[in-house]
Amino acid sequence: MTHEYKATIRWTRGAEEAFSDNRYSRGHLWSFDGGIEVPGSASPSVVPLPLSREEAVDPEEAFVAAVSSCHMLTFLSIAAKKRFVIDRYEDQALGVMTPNANGRLFISKVTLDPAVEFSGEKRPTPEQIAEMHHLAHKECFIANSVLTEIVVAGLPSH
């Protein structure tokens, strides 16, 4: 089974920008199916303001969000199949960028720190929650696509 996912990334040089002097806006637009558009930019920690856009999403944040979102969606599916009821899931995910063996920067670690609120008569034990997180990590498409270490706070590494 094959699935395809598309995104259109659009950048245009400003009329007042020479470009060849390396002083051009890194602001751009991400467009996805369904019509949603998201402002994108280089991170201000990589390209100083005003050449980057603080209010836009940078690729590194998007990567961390994709890892977190995939884990959450997989966790929710697992919990539902086990007949647990989740009222709320919030993750304060953190990505860390460090040099790799060749000295090139990469996001070497993403730590997920989910807070999950369950309700109903059937509540999972801490061990069942940990097992659902382990299974979510194992089944997450994004986690299976990257070399980055992904951990869930409070649980042993996979």
Image: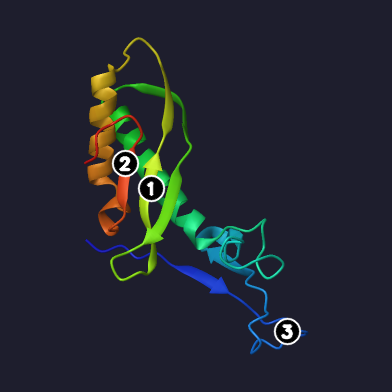
Question: Is residue 132 rendered to the left or right of residue 12?
Answer: left
Q: Amino acid at mark 1?
A: Val
Alpha carbon distance from label 2 to label 3: 42 Å
Q: Is residue 131 left or right of residue 110?
A: left
23 w.r.t. 101: above or below: below
Instruction: Name the residue carrying label 1.
Output: 110
- The residue that mark 2 highlights is 151
Residue 17: x, y in percent? 73, 84
Q: Which residue occupies the foreground of this view, 27 or 84?
A: 27
| Cα–Cα span, label 1 and label 3 | 36 Å
Q: CA distance from mark 1 to mark 2?
A: 6 Å
Please report the residue visible at 48 percent of the width from the left and 37 percent of the height from the top. Answer: 92
| Disc 3: CA contacts within 10 A as few (<14), some (14-19) or many (>=20) | few
Q: Residues within 10 Å of mark 1 (few under 14, many from 20)?
A: many
- Quadrant showing the C terminus: top left
Give the amino acid at mark 2. Val
Cβ atoms under marks 1 and 3 closer than 8 Å: no
Quick one: 49 or 64, which is closer to the camera?
49
**Amino acid at circle 3:** Glu
Q: Are marks 1 and 2 in contact (CB under 8 Å)?
A: yes
- Tell which of 117 and 86 is nearer to you: 117
Q: Secondary structure at mark 3?
A: loop
Residue 106 falls in image quadrant = bottom left
